[in-house]
Amino acid sequence: MNANDQVREVCSQLAKDPHLKGGYNAIGFSQGGQFLRAVAQRCPSPPMFNLISVGGQHQGVYGFPRCPGESSHICDWIRKTLDLGAYTQAVQEHLVQAEYWHDPLREEDYRKNSIFLADINQERGINETYKKNLMALKKFVMVKFLNDTMVDPPISEWFGYYKSGQAKETVPLRETPLYTEDRLGLQEMDKAGKLVFLGVEGDHLQFSEEWFCTTILPFLQ
């Protein structure tokens, strides 16, 4: 299903729920992290208080799960093969993973043809409403799995990504144009103490109940 349609459906459900009319906290697991960020940016009513992204890929992915292309020639070949159809209209409209596929070697194709991620990351222009709505969050918590073999590159879970034009070297959020140009308000949120970067040992979505209760639940109180 098209991610944009999913977001619209969620926004509709949230707006109709009387229990949430005063606001709510949101936790997104894996791709749910970027999908709920889209909800925060596009649907400010009811208001989202805190967004907790657990392993979300906020700058997208460029790789096959458990096959890191930056350290394996075979995996690099696989991701280049997957890339061939990623930005076609048919694939973009029907394969949700393609909608956050971000090829650092084809940035222009990504900006022009990505129907979801390029939009919520302000790659085609600045939507001030998106920026205003995201900045309204009290906290934006990003959890990165320190031994992640599913997400390539794992730094996308902290809003970092590959340096443009190649697919080996990564840069943290604070060195990306998205941050330095403050297209989403992340720089201002960071200075206000609204961004929280958490790391947890383990592979993708592998965490203990104790860690969740002691680390994540306090953000919901």
Image: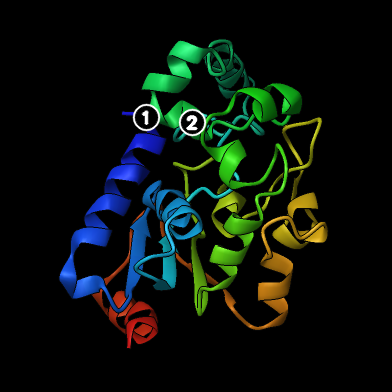
Residue displayed at 62% across by 55% down: 159
Instruction: Please state which amino acid type lies under the numbered disc 2.
Output: Glu
16 and 210: which one is in front? 16
* Apparent side of residue 82 relative to residue 28 in the rendered image (left or right): right
The reply to whether residue 213 is visible in this rendering is yes
Residue displayed at 56% across by 12% down: 81
Image mark for residue 99: 2
> How many discs mark residues in the rendered view?
2
* Apparent side of residue 134 relative to residue 167 in the rendered image (left or right): left
> Where in the figure is residue 109, as x and y percent of width and height?
69, 21
Q: Quadrant of the N terminus?
A: top left
Residue displayed at 55% across by 31% down: 101
Q: How is the rendered protein coloured?
A: rainbow
> Where in the figure is residue 111, as x and y percent of width and height?
68, 30
The local crowd at label 2, few if under 14, some if 14 to 19, many if 20 or more residues have their Cα within 10 Å, is: many
Q: Mark 2 or mark 1, which is nearer to you?
A: 1
Instruction: Please state which amino acid type lies under the numbered disc 1.
Output: Asn
Q: Quadrant of the C terminus?
A: bottom left
Return the disc, 2 or 1, that comes first in the chain's sequence: 1
- The residue to which callout 1 is attached is 2
| Inter-mark Cα distance, 2 to 1 | 8 Å
Q: In the rendered view, would you say 149 is above or below 211?
A: above
Would you identify the image quadrant in which residue 167 lies? Answer: top right
Would you identify the image quadrant in which residue 71 lies? Answer: top right
Tell whether label 1 touches label 2 (CB within 8 Å). yes
Image mark for residue 13: none
> Where in the figure is residue 58, as x and y percent of width and height?
55, 50
The local crowd at label 1, few if under 14, some if 14 to 19, many if 20 or more residues have their Cα within 10 Å, is: some
